Image (cartoon, helix red, strand yellow):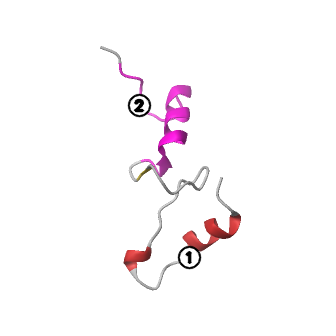
């Protein structure tokens, strides 16, 4: 879990566009971020296994 100050800093618009830091909206994790879902890999997996992300299901073959 990221500090609240780090999360607040990420929400501000940066001076330069290359300084944008994308964070998971659920836990504010910076690494392993998926833009399509606005989630980190850990939160994505938890929510997908619970069936809370529409259109996503665990693959099996």
**Residue drawn 47% across the image and 42% down it:** 41
**Residue on which disc 1 sits:** 12
Instruction: Give the answer, above or below, for where 6 lies relative to 49.
Output: below
Q: Residue furthest front?
A: 31
Instruction: Give the answer, above or below, for where 4 lies relative to 34.
Output: below
**Residue drawn 49% across the image and 48% down it:** 39
Q: Residue furthest right?
A: 4
In the image, the segment drawn in magenta is 37-59
Give the Cα separation between the discs numbered 2 and 1: 31 Å
Give the SS element for disc 1: loop
Give the SS element for disc 2: loop
**Residue drawn 48% across the image and 80% down it:** 14
The C terminus: image quadrant? top left
So how many labels did they put on this image?
2
**Residue drawn 44% across the image and 47% down it:** 37
Q: Which mark is residue 56?
A: 2
**47 to the left or right of 20:** right
């Amino acid at each position: 879990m990221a500090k609240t100050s780090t999360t607040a800093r990420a929400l501000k618009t940066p001076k330069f566009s290359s300084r944008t830091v994308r964070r998971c909206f659920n836990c504010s994790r910076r690494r392993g971020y998926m833009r399509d879902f606005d989630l980190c890999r850990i939160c994505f997996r938890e929510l997908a296994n619970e069936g809370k992300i529409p259109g996503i299901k665990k693959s099996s073959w």
